Each structure stands twice: as C-alpha cells, then as structure tokens.
C-alpha cells in the first residue's frame, strides 16, 4: 500500500471499514456523518500511504484517525449548539411593534435578502431551511442529502458573506454582529 498499490489499499479498506464504520456511528449517531468521516479517514490514509511503512500498526492508526475526526465533529457541533442557544437567549422573540423597530427590521430584511441573492441557490436554500424554517442540521441533511458537516460549512460561509455584505466589522462574532446592527 505504501508503494501505491491500489489493490492492497482496497484490501485494507475492506478489512477495516466495517469496524471503523461501527465505531464512528456509535460516536456520532449519524449515518451521513459516519459515512463522511469514513471516507475522509481512508482518503487521509491513502494520501499519506508512503508513511505507512513506518507505522507499526496501520489498522490501529486508522482507528485513531477516525476516532479523532468523529470527536472533532462532535466538539464542533457542541460549540455550534452553544452559540445558537446564546443567540436565542440574547435576542428573544420580541413583540416590540414600535415604528423604529419595524423600520430597523425592514431595513435589515432588505439588506439580508440582497446579500442572500448574491449566493448560489444551494447556499440560499440551506440558509432559509435553517434560519427561516428552523430546521436542525440533521433535518436539513435528510432533506438535501448533504452531510451535517457540509450544512455547517455552508452556514458558516453564508454568515460570513452576510456579515461582509452588511458592512459589519470583520472581527465581530455573530452575537456581536447582531448587537452591532440592531443597536447602532
């Protein structure tokens, strides 16, 4: 395999993939994430195949890579959930119907829609499913066929685009950006 023998890699994959799949699925409890992590694990193994000759237990090494990728995904998901909960706490649904609040809301919505129109259709769709329809990453994943991590990456890119199009300072966090816009 270290010499680039694809048949050897196929045998390695066939031998380890089922047990790695089970390990990762137990950790993530998400079939789409598990499939993506499995693919990424073996792509990483193949990309560094020259170094495998120096590794005493390549199977164990493969398990470690998969476990680390799964744990990274879980930590990222936990950070995202914490951020979403913080936003909800800081900006609860308001019933303030004052003229100023309505004007700010209209202005924000117009600028937001302009920024969204500049994005590819798939990014617009994922954003709207998440932010307007309130779907979770898992629900969006099921409806679009994209992995939860891909959904997350799309949303990060969309939010970055929106921040830049709304003229918000680049150093602001999402929470700070919302506060900056609504309290200027």
Image (cartoon, helix red, strand yellow):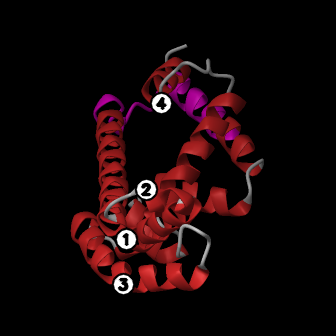
Closer to the camera: disc 1 or disc 3? Answer: 3
Residue 123, image x and y in percent?
A: 64, 57
Mark 4 — residue? Answer: 174
Residue 133 appears in the figure:
no
For the residues labelled 2 and 4, the Cα–Cα distance comes to 45 Å
- Separation of disc 4 and disc 3 at Cα? 44 Å
* N-term mark: 2 or 3: 3
Q: How far, Cα to Cα, is label 2 from label 3? A: 20 Å
Q: Quadrant of the C terminus?
A: top right
Decide: few, some or many residues near mark 3? Use Cα within 10 Å; few <14, some 14-19, many ≥20: few
Mark 2 vs mark 4: which is more N-terminal?
2
Q: Position of residue 65 (x, y in %)?
A: 37, 57
Residue sitting at the far left: 26
Which residue is tagged 3?
15
Query: What residue would you read off at disc 2?
Result: 54
At horizontal 49% and vertical 63% (from top left) the residue drawn is 45
State the CA–CA distance, disc 1 to disc 2. 28 Å
Image quadrant of residue 163? top right
Q: Going from the N terminus, do you reach mark 1 or mark 2 first?
A: 1
Q: Crowding at label 2, few (<14), some or many (≥20) Cα neighbours within 10 Å?
A: few
Q: Earlier in the sequence, mark 4 or mark 3?
A: 3
Q: Nearer the viewer, residue 45 or 84?
A: 45
Secondary structure under tag 3 reads helix
Which segment did they paint magenta? 89-110
């Amino acid at each position: 395999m270290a010499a680039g023998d694809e048949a050897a890699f196929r045998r390695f994959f066939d031998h380890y993939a089922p047990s790695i799949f089970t390990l990762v699925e137990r950790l993530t409890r998400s079939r789409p994430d598990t499939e993506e992590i499995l693919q990424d694990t073996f792509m990483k193994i193949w990309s560094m195949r020259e170094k495998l000759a120096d590794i005493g237990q390549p199977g164990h090494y493969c398990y470690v890579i998969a476990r680390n990728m799964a744990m990274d995904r879980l930590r990222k998901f936990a950070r995202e959930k914490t951020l979403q909960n913080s936003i909800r706490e800081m900006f609860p649904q308001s019933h303030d119907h004052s003229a100023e609040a309505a004007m700010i809301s209209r202005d924000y919505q117009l600028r937001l829609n302009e920024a969204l129109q500049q994005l590819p259709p798939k990014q617009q769709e994922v954003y709207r499913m998440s932010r307007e329809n309130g779907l979770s990453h898992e629900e969006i994943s099921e409806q679009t066929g994209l992995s939860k991590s891909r959904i997350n990456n799309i949303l990060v890119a969309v939010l970055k685009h929106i921040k830049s199009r709304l003229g918000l300072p680049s150093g602001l966090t999402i929470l700070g950006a919302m506060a900056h816009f609504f309290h200027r």
